[in-house]
Image (spheres, rainbow, N blue to C red):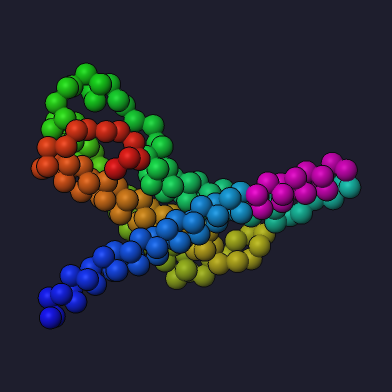
Amino acid sequence: MRGCAAVGARPLILHVMQRILKALNSVEEWTLVLVMLGLAFLSFLQVFCRYVLQFSFTWMEELGRYLGVFIAFLGASLGVKYASHFSMDLIYERVSSDRFRHGLKVVINIASGLMFFVIAWYGWEQAMKLRHFGVLTSALQLPKYWAYLPIPFFSTIMGIRFINLGIKHAIRLVRGEPFRMGAEL
């Protein structure tokens, strides 16, 4: 009886995990949209105030810079998720062996994932140094390490996504499945 419950529970767990991931993906995408719209609005407001009202916000350039870092790393993470980053496809086009293509993708994705884990590690160390020294931003007077936190956070997410892609290609390699590029995995 216990084995039946475990078998029946497995699809439920997968279903719940898929719903959680779908919700997180939605939050991630809407966060990017809203932050970009907010940055565009604030930039427009700054330009309008500077050239029409002859008044300028001292904090806008700093906030724009930090939001730009946030947008860049969040967007890069989404780019990994949707496989929309540029790649050199010449080798994949010239080689007809699906096994070689999958093997190459495994190596590339695992190496990329490890690289982003290293970036996350050093990004976290830098943010914690700034936190330890109590450095504040010049205009906003906020803890400067806040501006550095998107780097380790989104680098970790990119690392996980690259490792996941590497594992998917490894499974396809073992199963002998045909090679496909892009987000179809």
Q: Quadrant of residue 139?
A: bottom right
Residue 185 vs residue 123, the one in the foreground: 185
Vertical side of 177 occupied by 53: above or below: below
- Figure disc tally: 0
Q: Position of residue 149 (x, y in %)?
A: 46, 60
Left or right: where 61 falls relative to 146: right
The residue located at (88%, 43%) in the rendering is: 52
Q: Position of residue 160 (x, y in %)?
A: 30, 54
Residue 7 vs residue 133, the one in the foreground: 7
Left or right: where 84 falls relative to 67: left
Would you say residue 114 is visible in this rendering?
A: no
* Dominant secondary structure (helix, strand or loop) of the stretch shown in magenta: helix
Would you say residue 144 is visible in this rendering?
A: yes
The residue located at (60%, 66%) in the rendering is: 142
- Pick out the residue farthest to the bottom: 1
The residue located at (26%, 51%) in the rendering is: 164
What is the quadrant of the C terminus in the image?
Answer: top left
Q: Position of residue 13 (x, y in %)?
A: 29, 69
Q: Quadrant of residue 6?
A: bottom left
Query: Does the stretch in magenta take in 50?
Result: yes
Vertical side of 129 occupied by 85: above or below: above
Which portion, as a residue range, is magenta? Answer: 37-52
What is the quadrant of the N terminus in the image?
Answer: bottom left
Query: Does the stretch in magenta take in 74?
Result: no
The residue located at (45%, 71%) in the rendering is: 132
Vertical side of 135 occupied by 30: above or below: above
Residue 60 vs residue 78, the one in the foreground: 78
- Pick out the residue farthest to the top: 94
Q: Position of residue 53 (x, y in %)?
A: 89, 47
